Amino acid sequence: MVILLLALLLTLYNEAEQNTLEARETARVAIAANELDSYISLINSDLLMLAGTPALRQLALQDSPASRQAVTGLFQAFLVGKPLYNTIRYLDCRGMEIIRLNLVNGQPVAVPEAQLQNKADRYYVRETLQLAEGEIYVSPLDLSIENGQILQPHKPMIRFGTLLPDGQGQPAGVLILNLQGQILLDRFRQSMGHDYPALLLNRDGDWLVSPQPEQEWGFMYGQPGGFARKEPEVWKTMQNQLSGHTRGRHGLYVYTTVQPLQAADRASASPDHPDASYQWKVVSLIPEQALPLARLARSAVPVLGIPLLLAGLGGLAQLLASRQQLQQQILQAALLHQEITDNLGEGVIVLDRKGRVAEINPEGERLLGWTRQEIMGQEAHDRFHHHPASTATQCPILQVILDGQPYHSESEFFCRKDGQIFPVGLNAAPLTGSHGQIAGTVIAFRDITRLRQSQEQIRHMAYHDALTDLPNRRFLTEQLQRLLDEHQELALVFIDVDHFKTINDTYGHNQGDAYLKQVASLLQASIRSADLVIRQGGDEFIILLPGAVPEKNAEEVCRRLLEQFSTPITVGEQPLQVSLSLGIAVYPGSATTADGLMQQADAAMYRAKQAGRNTWSC
């Protein structure tokens, strides 16, 4: 009887220890998978943001030196702010590089036109050209090859591409971003920690990350499927399930799946990607000797005897009584932040089945401003999730606990202890208990305030003139088309600064630039808040005047401008007279399109020049 009780004791002990270990490692791989998924989604957002800029859209519609210059400047600013990429390029629909910038010693360097190459034979160009607008191509993670040779030391590379249309539904070209893959792999290793060996496997069972570095990238050297060959049964199980754990020759494998193309689909709002098989397996290997039964055998068998029996009998009742409580605490015990998340660059929060905070890592404390003691047990939706338009039952993060489906977003907001609301990018993944039931969710999040600022800076550059900071022609085109689509009355005033070339030739370009900046400032000060001044380029400006009685409004603006500029402006210490020739076009009128209105205003402006300058014409 005593032996039976001891056997039961050991069985319960082993089961509880095994459950705790499995839960902890399940959390570990979930966090690492969230890190990878979040990183890929961030890259996809960058790609689509760039593809949507007016500068790149204009280049896709009409290749010109001006549009190439604008896109080159955009790419330079992007690489300076995003050193995780080492190459950005735009290629036409024939695969010819039109613009390519490389990051060299931390600085963006444009490849000279004579050195641009045709990449039509590269798989990533062919695949991207097959996409629909808004879809994203994600290449396999492999090593860079130059002239048929694998670069040494290894340079892991992953490419992201999207299509740019020509306005007629046909591909005009592709935008390709090259990510420095080592950054991605370093983030993976950091998030997995060092407790147990970490593996990252591609869809063919090749090692991308292995505890034995010599095993990595074997497929690049003609040795595909290294892990799949060594652990065929384990690999078969992993292929059939997105996550779980299974025993192999070397111990217990706890795994989950990252699907890069699903992250791309979320960024592009595409429902499905044709290649759903593209996936990575995030794996933690618990060696055989670290498993509870092995540890128990090593410690118990050598001293098995009466003392152990008595100790087992004495603790049996207590163990049986606390077994249910132990099961309920597995999630919290599994995710002790000291063991898993102290060194992560992202905040990590674990919620229990009721949406209450069960664990938080130090970075999460720092980002939210609450200490662990203050936030433990608090309801996430009420405490820090800024989601005023929903109730807790509608909260997309809490929905993960209900339906078991991961949730990714780059548009959620959290609230700090001091009340400050900030944007976050997050991944929320369900966390399963020992019997497969959903026990809570793991949330990995990061403050994306700087990312938003960076994106806004790039957007500002795309829509504004670098010298005067006025909106540019692209911005005007979008606003004008919107007003025309809404059939709003409006007027355009084209402005040419007379004799500007003489000022440039006489006083130099620096003084000329200062002169134009003062002109721009005075133009801005002479209009209504609803009006828009843009710099067309060179010495040309345009004013957009929405509202009723457009011709009368435009003539009043022209009179005011001529009066405003009747007094010389001072550049440096030099007083300079400003003369303007102005042309007016109105809608509704003889022109009904944006291009037609622009042509009318331009023609009217030239009539003003022919009439002697410093006047306006309709």
Image (cartoon, rainbow, N blue to C red):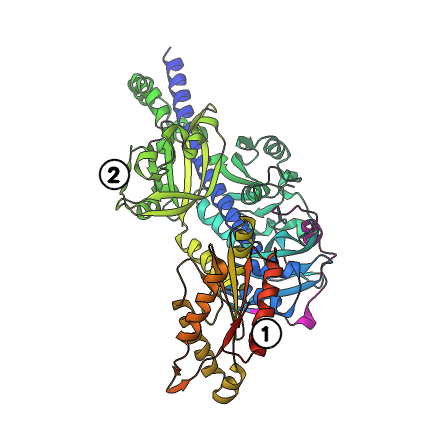
Asked which quadrant contains residue 72, the reply is bottom right
Residue type at mark 1 is Tyr
Q: Residue at x 51, y 81 (%)?
A: 500
Asked which quadrant contains residue 372, the reply is top left
Look at the picture and state if 224 lies above or below 322. Answer: below
Q: Nearer the viewer, residue 279 or 101?
A: 101
Asked which quadrant contains residue 609, the reply is bottom right
Cα–Cα gap, marks 1 and 2 = 73 Å
Q: Is residue 600 magenta?
A: no
The label on residue 105 is none
Q: Secondary structure at mark 1?
A: helix
Tell me the mark number nearer the camera, choosing from 1 and 2. Answer: 1
* Image quadrant in which the N terminus is located: top left
Q: Residue furthest bottom?
A: 506
Viewed as shown, does residue 95 lie left or right of 18?
right
Look at the picture and state if 328 lies above or below 32. Answer: above
Viewed as shown, does residue 491 lie left or right of 561?
right
Q: Which residue is mark 2?
A: 373
The label on residue 606 is 1
Q: Nearer the viewer, residue 45 or 5?
A: 45
Question: Dot 1 surroundings within 10 Å: few (below 14), some, or many (20 or more)?
Answer: some
Locate residue 455, reporting x and y percent. Answer: 47, 56
Residue type at mark 2 is Gln
In the image, which residues are magenta?
109-135
Locate residue 494, reporting x and y percent. Answer: 53, 68
Q: Secondary structure at mark 2?
A: helix
* Image quadrant in which the C terminus is located: bottom right
